[in-house]
Image (spheres, grey):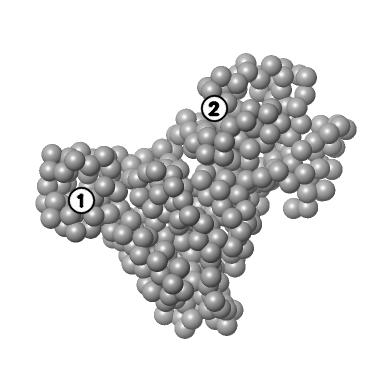
């Protein structure tokens, strides 16, 4: 959406005066799924889809929130910014205000905020992280609170934990705040050290396929996986001093996995440990320009997410099955939390048209659903735009 159009809508709604605008992107994760809350590696890119926030401070004792795409309007007293507002969408930005309060920031005066998001809804491309990050960056700027980008990332993640109830890792908020156009973010989710790896994909594009089966990243299934990983760590701790699954190599795991009695928990841990290894290897292949090998790791990642982690589901599996085998498709896998949402594929330029038509038709035949495809464009992380 054109920023001038958004500005005009803001002025229409809240009246004349000054206004600042911010943007934070959604993300697509290339590999490293369900590793972030285990202290492992991830490799997301920030997308050109994202969330916009126009904001103005006021001298009124309440904050007004509205969203053009969510068709939402509400008003929250500055006294109540630490409390969830029912189960409404507005909890994402309110949850971010709450994190500033927790750090001791006092909002004596309120603000007016207008949001607009163009991340496909329910697609697992981190629309919620984009709202959280854009809100955090906007508040930090207009109230001059001076938090670092990493502080803002952590506050955005906490807003998701406390106001949406999803005990997510840090990948989505980190990618949304720290991404860079033309690069993937290779992040160590334990230390938060990261490297921006150029996406030198000679003649190959990242293609996102939206299954249009809304991803159901409710707290239930996701938090269940978080719990299973913790159970695996607890089962292994008597045999090796580990804090998290990232502290164990694939080789060590194959010797120690017998100590995990619960076979489901063992498979969850096997996915995480192997996925961390795949992510490390994938980055090396990306740096070396070996996109064929990168693509093979994506396929292995999907298999592991389907068989061991069980977060794919029939639609994501159908989309990956329909994508593989088409000439020029180097790799394909689900991306994000799973249980619906999107796949990400690496496709040679000359094969993109055929990929979209054949994978789309194959998927429709298997599921009855019509998918949507986007050739991914990357962008920078959260920033002021006007
Ligand atoms: C969701 C979560 F929000 C992320 O933190 C991450 O765990 C991802 O699922 C799976 O890799 O997007």
Mark carried by residue 99 = 2
Please report contact status of discs 2 and 1: CB closer than 8 Å, yes or no. no
Instruction: Please name the residue shown 29% across and 48% down the image.
Output: 246
Instruction: Write down the quadrant of residue 17 in the picture.
Output: top right
Please tell me in which quadrant of the rendered image residue 33 appears: bottom left
Q: Residue 178 or 233: which is nearer the viewer?
A: 178
Question: SS at mark 2?
Answer: helix
Per the image, the residue denoted by label 1 is 266
The answer to whether residue 172 is left or right of residue 36 is right
Image quarter (top left, top right, bottom left or bottom right) of the C terminus: top right
| Residue 134, image x, y percentages | 63, 41
Give me the residue at 36% from left, 40% from top.
223
Secondary structure state at the residue bearing disc 1: helix
Q: Earlier in the sequence, mark 2 or mark 1?
A: 2
Binning the other alpha carbons within 10 Å of mark 1 as few (below 14), some (14 to 19) or many (20 upward) gives many
State which quadrant residue 182 falls in. Answer: bottom right
Is ligand 1 closer than 8 angstroms to the Cβ of mark 2? no
Density class for disc 2 (Cα within 10 Å; few <14, some 14-19, many ≥20) is: many
Q: Is residue 270 left or right of residue 215?
A: left
Marks 2 and 1, how far apart at CA:
36 Å
- Residue placed at 28% from the left, 58% from the top? 274
Q: Which-is-in-front pick, marks 2 and 1?
A: 2
Vertical placement of residue 31 versus 113, above or below = below
Residue 84: image x %, image y %?
54, 26
- 370 lies above or below 85: below
Instruction: Name the residue at 30% across, 53% down.
Output: 272
Residue 212 at what x, y percent from top left?
A: 53, 59
> Is 204 or 220 nearer to us in this picture?
204
Residue 23 in sight: yes
């Amino acid at each position: 959406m054109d920023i001038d159009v958004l500005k005009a809508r803001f002025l229409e709604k809240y009246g004349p005066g000054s206004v600042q605008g911010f943007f934070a992107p959604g993300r697509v994760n290339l590999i490293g799924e369900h590793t972030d809350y285990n202290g492992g590696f991830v490799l997301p890119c920030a997308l050109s889809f994202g969330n916009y926030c126009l904001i103005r401070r006021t001298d009124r004792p309440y904050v007004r929130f509205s969203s053009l795409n969510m068709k939402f309007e509400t008003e929250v007293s500055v006294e109540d910014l630490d409390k969830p507002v029912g189960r409404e969408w507005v909890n994402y930005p309110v949850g971010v205000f709450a994190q500033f309060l927790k750090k001791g920031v006092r909002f004596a005066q309120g603000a007016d905020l207008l949001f607009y998001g163009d991340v496909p809804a329910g697609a697992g491309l981190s629309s919620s992280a984009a709202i959280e990050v854009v809100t955090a960056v906007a508040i930090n700027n207009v109230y001059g609170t001076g938090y670092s980008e990493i502080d803002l990332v952590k506050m955005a993640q906490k807003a998701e934990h406390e106001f949406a109830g999803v005990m997510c890792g840090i990948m989505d908020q980190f990618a949304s705040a720290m991404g860079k156009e033309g690069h993937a973010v290779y992040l160590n989710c334990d230390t938060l050290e990261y490297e921006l790896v150029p996406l030198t994909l000679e003649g190959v594009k990242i293609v996102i396929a939206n299954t249009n089966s809304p991803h159901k990243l409710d707290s239930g299934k996701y938090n269940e996986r978080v719990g299973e990983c913790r159970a695996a760590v607890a089962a292994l701790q008597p045999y090796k001093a580990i804090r998290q699954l990232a502290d164990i190599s694939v080789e060590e795991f194959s010797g120690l996995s017998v100590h995990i009695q619960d076979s489901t928990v063992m498979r969850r841990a096997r996915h995480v440990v192997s996925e961390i290894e795949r992510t490390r290897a994938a980055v090396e292949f990306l740096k070396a320009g070996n996109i064929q090998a990168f693509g093979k790791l994506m396929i292995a990642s999907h298999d592991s997410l389907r068989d061991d982690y069980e977060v794919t589901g029939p639609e994501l599996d159908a989309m990956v099955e329909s994508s593989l085998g088409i000439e020029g498709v180097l790799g394909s896998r689900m991306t994000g939390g799973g249980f619906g949402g999107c796949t990400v594929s690496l496709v040679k330029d000359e094969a993109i048209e055929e990929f979209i038509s054949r994978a789309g038709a194959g998927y429709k035949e298997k599921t009855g659903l019509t998918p949507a495809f986007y050739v991914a464009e990357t962008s920078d992380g959260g920033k002021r735009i006007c």
